[in-house]
Image (cartoon, coloured by chain):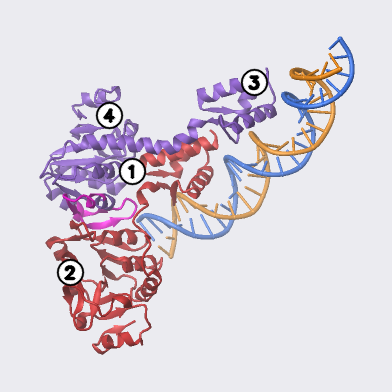
Chain colours: A purple, B red, C blue, D orange
Amino acid sequence: MLKEERHAYILHQVNLHNKVLSSHLSEQIQVSEDTIRRDLAELAQEGKIIKVHGGALSNSFHQGITSQDVYAVKDKKTIALKAVELIHDGMFVLTTGGTTIAELARVLPRDLQATFITVSLPAAFEYANHPNIEVIVIGDKLSKGSKITVGGEAISKIKMIKADLCFLGNNAIDVEDGLTDNDWDVVQVKRAMISTAKKVVVLTISEKMNTSEQLKICDVDEIDILITELPPDAKKLQPYKKKGIQIL
Amino acid sequence: MLKEERHAYILHQVNLHNKVLSSHLSEQIQVSEDTIRRDLAELAQEGKIIKVHGGALSNSFHQGITSQDVYAVKDKKTIALKAVELIHDGMFVLTTGGTTIAELARVLPRDLQATFITVSLPAAFEYANHPNIEVIVIGDKLSKGSKITVGGEAISKIKMIKADLCFLGNNAIDVEDGLTDNDWDVVQVKRAMISTAKKVVVLTISEKMNTSEQLKICDVDEIDILITELPPDAKKLQPYKKKGIQIL
DNA sequence: TTGTTTTCTGCGTTTTTTTGCAGAAATTGA
DNA sequence: TCAATTTCTGCAAAAAAACGCAGAAAACAA
């Protein structure tokens, strides 16, 4: 097989599978690994692939890591914009922390007048940038990892609040396993929030759907509204709709 | 699985769940924990994640509030180092916010075990970096400008605490006018702190001495200890010494 | 076609990278 | 404090890459 042919073949394989192994290619094309390495080196030189120890990766791979973040931000903004619709003047809103919630804080209309209650310090910071909303911080012992206040005092304070809405930025959700998380303190707080809010809204990027963590927060049927970046009729969301959850 | 693939996978997991465990990843990717640790170390080196004992955290969350270009850092560090001497194991310490206090948080000995109580969110963040101290956040309505919680709830909570020490990072101090400030909410909080603490310690750079603001917090004779970057026998400090204040 | 030159390919050897392991050191949580 | 985990360190084996070289193949010119 000619060099150019090999190059074409390799490029095709890389774009198809996002990854090739030198050893594998050597076997497929029946040339020495040395030759394959030289081919990969050339293609990498031309910027058509990314050479790594053991083989090569598609370009989209490495770019994807950085732009992935951007994608996620875009998705989170989409989610935040949907969530904002639920908030009206005068409401009391309970929220957790997390990046999705941070995005929500940023897209709040400037003329919105509402009260946001949170145990998350980062979230409080975000809300503090808004001119008109009132921010209530629930105090107690500070959990260092998650930067939220935790403890009996915090829990009982949360339960004293009759919130109109409760926004949960979540870690993992699954139709069977329900809402789950990996931090004990966070779980306690979320449980308290769910128990006291009139409406429980879960914000999640679709990627986190159908995944589970170790600690259970609640079953899916305790959720009132589910917001993802997907359109409400997306296939992935139907199992949740069947459970009676409103999808936005 | 290639190293770069693992890195991409790990990064993805971290950004997705804000937290990963070495043991968990090792199981998922089917490589030894050693390899995972090396991967995490590399990613941390590149600044893509934050490595912690047992796994790694997303850095998107933790970056932020700290170390802006602070005015007179050197002086503030000098002050902080003097202040640290006053804190001993088991103490309950009330603190306000401000950059001097932030500096104090950074120079706390790693083995110090004490409880820090604050209404300042930025201060709470700083204290949260310390492994052994307990941080109690006093909750209430968040004052947006100063990022401290204010209100009757906060005041009464402060008064319920019998603190050993109270550190006041201050705006203005004058022998005649006493301790003054320009933020109504801050004044309320500081008054409460002074009234409940066994010892009141004022931290100030000498530049702020002999200046006054509109709102009075207390007279100088309510202050127990004054700490500045100057040596205790500095001329500027003598009027305060005469009032019976201990100078460090 | 033939001879010369250039490029390509495979092989053996050396070097580098990667990975797992064992034991010591450290961190953590009770 | 102690016990359990987790991490670090040096090390060794395996895999992959780099390097030089020689023969094969291709390109080119006469």
- Comes first in the chain, label 1 or label 4: 4
Q: Quadrant of residue A56?
A: top right
Are the residues flagged by discs 1 and 3 in contact, CB closer than 8 Å? no
Residue at mark 2 to residue at mark 3: CA–CA distance: 77 Å
Depth order, front residue of B116/D7: B116
Q: Position of residue B109 (x, y in %)?
A: 40, 68
Mark 2 or mark 4, whichever is nearer to me: 2
Q: Which residue is mark 4?
A: A175
Q: Mark 2 and mark 4, same subunit?
A: no
Q: Mark 4 and mark 3, same subunit?
A: yes
Q: Residue at x 64, y 20 (%)?
A: A4
- Judging from the image, mark 2 belongs to the subunit labelled B
Mark 4 or mark 3, whichever is nearer to me: 3
- The amino acid at mark 4 is Val
User: Residue A57 magenta-drawn?
Assistant: no
- The amino acid at mark 3 is Glu
**Residue B160 visible, this orientation:** no
- The amino acid at mark 1 is Asn
- Residue A182 is marked as 1
Depth order, front residue of A135/A200: A135
Are the residues flagged by discs 1 and 4 in contact, CB closer than 8 Å? no
Residue at mark 2 to residue at mark 1: CA–CA distance: 40 Å
Q: Which residue is mark 2?
A: B187
In the rendered view of the protein, which quadrant contains the C terminus of chain B? Answer: bottom left
Mark 1 or mark 3, whichever is nearer to me: 3
Specify the segment rendered in magenta.
A126-154
Disc 1 crowd rating (10 Å Cα; few below 14, some 14-19, many 20+) is some
Q: Which residue is mark 3?
A: A4
Q: Quadrant of residue A39?
A: top right
Q: Is residue A65 above or below residue B99?
A: above
Residue at mark 1 to residue at mark 4: CA–CA distance: 18 Å
Q: Position of residue B223 (x, y in %)?
A: 23, 80
